Amino acid sequence: MQVRAALVREAGRLEVVPVALEPPRAGEVLVRIRAAGVCHSDLHTLRGELRARPPLVLGHEGAGVVEAVGPGVTRVAPGDPVVINWLPGCRTCEPCLRGEPNLCRRLEQTTFQGRLPDGSTRIRLEDGTAVGHYLGSATMAEYTVVPEEGVVPLLEGVPFEVGAILGCAVVTGVGAVFHTARMPPGQRAAVIGCGGVGLSALLGCLATGAHTVIAVDTVADKLALARRLGATHTVHAGQEDVVALLRHLTDGGPDYVFDSVGAATTIRQALEAVRPGGTATLIGLHAALDEVAIRPGVLIFQNKTLRGSFAGSMRPEVDLPMLQRIYLAGHLDLDALITRRYPLEEIAQAFADMEAGRLARGVLVME
Ligand SMILES: [Zn+2]
Ligand SMILES: [Zn+2]
């Protein structure tokens, strides 16, 4: 079938055009995408800054309806509403078996290369060239094909738009708090960066029962949104001394700091500000390939922990339904994270708004 999709033909060149989508093979499902979240990693991939190479169709956050299933599919049927899971573990490698499917060994050769688990792709250009599914998902399209383990049920009462942001932004932020840092109740926390991931971490801190949650950003509008979501304090990083203020507001430093930016400056701020014995968790990818100077004495003499969190240490089949139930119970205000909706054709505008700091999360909505 021909489907309209956000295609990257070569690095830096984005167009919304029809591409050929093959039917699902054994163990795969065809999903009609209803909403797709817009993430920084899509933009980095468009620019050729991450591992996945063009040609590919962008998008890894999404929700929609199963339209057809290939032979042997048992977990979903046509008509089922689903959330796309871009981290489908193989369930047989050691990391999967020890409960860390976000570290699955198959991902390196499949998901991160823009391939399905069998190593191939279902998308083609007019001349027959294979087109990658970004992060094995390709959700910025009217339809996509993913493995059966690449979807989890969208629960009744959860809008497609909310389902669309669960799989990356929300699970990455909330999971960093719940799973990676395992933050106990009653803590003082700070979140650096108030985009979709940072605000999700903020919501995770609130859901955990933190009494102090400080939001840090350089954009006043984002700090205002953080306050509406429940931040107890805000720090304007462009105008105020972040480390000094975080220490002052928490009587010696937050117990937990979550850095959703991941730049050299914010990593150092997180580590410096967290209280002795506290934990700084890195979530953001901005300096992922850079070398960042830190003073080991801060870690050693002050017993601090600096750790990384990939995709919120998510176990998709457990976490994606759990997050929906917390949302349905009214303890995760995910509707407030969706700042703007766009038709698929306006993907370039969505990227521009995201870069300008105008969005918590933008969502592409397919009618
Ligand atoms: Zn595995
Ligand atoms: Zn993402």
Image (cartoon, rainbow, N blue to C red):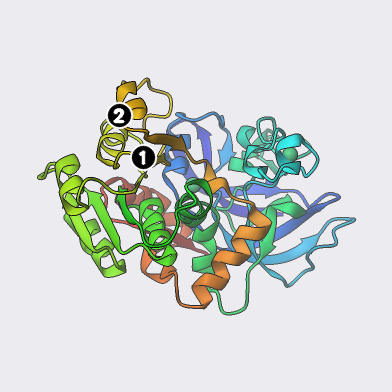
Farthest residue toward the left? 239
Q: Is mark 1 within 8 Å of ligand 2?
A: no
Q: CA distance from mark 2 to mark 1?
A: 22 Å
Residue 116 to residue 336: above or below: above
**Mark drawn on residue 180:** none
Tag 1, which secondary structure?
loop
Quadrant in which ligand 1 is drawn: top right
Q: Which mark is residue 264?
A: 2
Q: Secondary structure at mark 2?
A: helix
Which residue is label 1 attached to? 277
Q: 248 or 13, which lies in front?
A: 248
Q: Nearer the viewer, mark 2 or mark 1?
A: 1
State the residue at coordinates (58%, 38%).
56
Pinpoint residue 275: horizontal percent, then vertical percent: 29, 42
Q: Crowdedness of circle 1 by 10 Å Cα count: few (<14), some, many (20+)?
A: some
Whole-percent x, y for residue 78 in the image = 77, 69
Looking at the image, how many numbered discs can be counted on the residues? 2
Residue 123 pos. (x, y %):
68, 43
Q: Nearer the viewer, residue 166 or 301?
A: 301
State the image coordinates of residue 124 (x, y, percent, origin top left). 68, 40
